[in-house]
Image (cartoon, grey):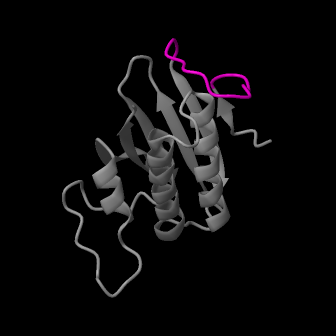
């Protein structure tokens, strides 16, 4: 198991609703397409453990947002030999799940919320941040240190 993985609770075989404590999940993944796919699968599993089963709209929406942010970290921010970090945070009584993806390219920031240019109709890509903006309650970018940036979003929980 990846030593960078942090679970907020022990493994539970099925979903249960938890609201008593802040829940965190964090993992360091390779900046590869495989790492982006794994980020989505791990997020789906963690949400299932936290009480939002795989077949719920909440789980599907949150994992789509994870997939978009992780894919952007891999495609646009790859730094050779550097990984990206996925972090999920759920606060008790909070209305939203916070998704954060931190990568090794602070110089490559996405457009600000509300300023995403329309995608080219000729291309099959370029719509990921539009999905993030449409499906999240809000999103943005922060810099933690001179070597990384974090793109985050929050999704309402039903």
Q: Is residue 125 above or below residue 141?
A: below
The residue lying furthest to the right in this view is: 1
Image quarter hosting the C terminus: top left
Residue 43 in the figure: left or right of residue 137: right
Residue depicted at 35% across the width and 54% down the height: 132
Is residue 147 at all visible to an observer of this figure? Answer: no
User: Is the stretch drawn in magenta largely helix, strand or loop?
Assistant: loop
Total labels drawn: 0
Image position, residue 94 (x, y; %)? 37, 22
Q: Is residue 54 above or below residue 19?
A: below
Is residue 29 at all visible to an observer of this figure? Answer: yes
Magenta stretch contains residue 145:
no
Q: Is residue 122 above or below residue 88?
A: below
Q: Is residue 58 above or below residue 94?
A: below
The one nearer the camera, 44 or 8, is: 44
Q: Quadrant of residue 116?
A: bottom left
The residue lying furthest to the top in this view is: 20
Image position, residue 109 (x, y; %)? 35, 60
Magenta stretch contains residue 20:
yes
Image position, residue 157 (x, y; %)? 40, 32
The one nearer the camera, 4 or 72, is: 72
Residue depicted at 51% across the width and 63% down the height: 71
Which region of the structure is painted magenta? Answer: 8-21
């Amino acid at each position: 198991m990846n030593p960078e993985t942090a679970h907020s609770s022990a493994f539970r075989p099925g979903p249960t609703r938890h609201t008593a404590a802040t829940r965190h999940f964090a993992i360091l993944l390779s900046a590869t397409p495989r790492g982006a796919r794994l980020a989505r699968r791990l997020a789906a599993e963690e949400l299932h453990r936290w009480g939002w089963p795989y077949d719920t709209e909440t789980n599907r929406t949150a994992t789509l947002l994870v997939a978009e942010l992780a894919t952007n970290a891999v495609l646009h921010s790859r730094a050779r030999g550097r990984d990206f970090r996925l972090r999920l945070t759920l606060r008790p009584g909070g209305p939203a799940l916070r998704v954060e993806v931190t990568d090794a390219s602070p110089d490559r920031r996405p457009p600000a919320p509300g300023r995403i240019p329309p995608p080219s109709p000729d291309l099959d890509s370029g719509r990921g941040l539009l999905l993030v903006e449409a499906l999240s309650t809000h999103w943005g970018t922060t810099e933690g240190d001179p070597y990384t940036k974090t793109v985050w979003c929050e999704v309402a929980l039903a």
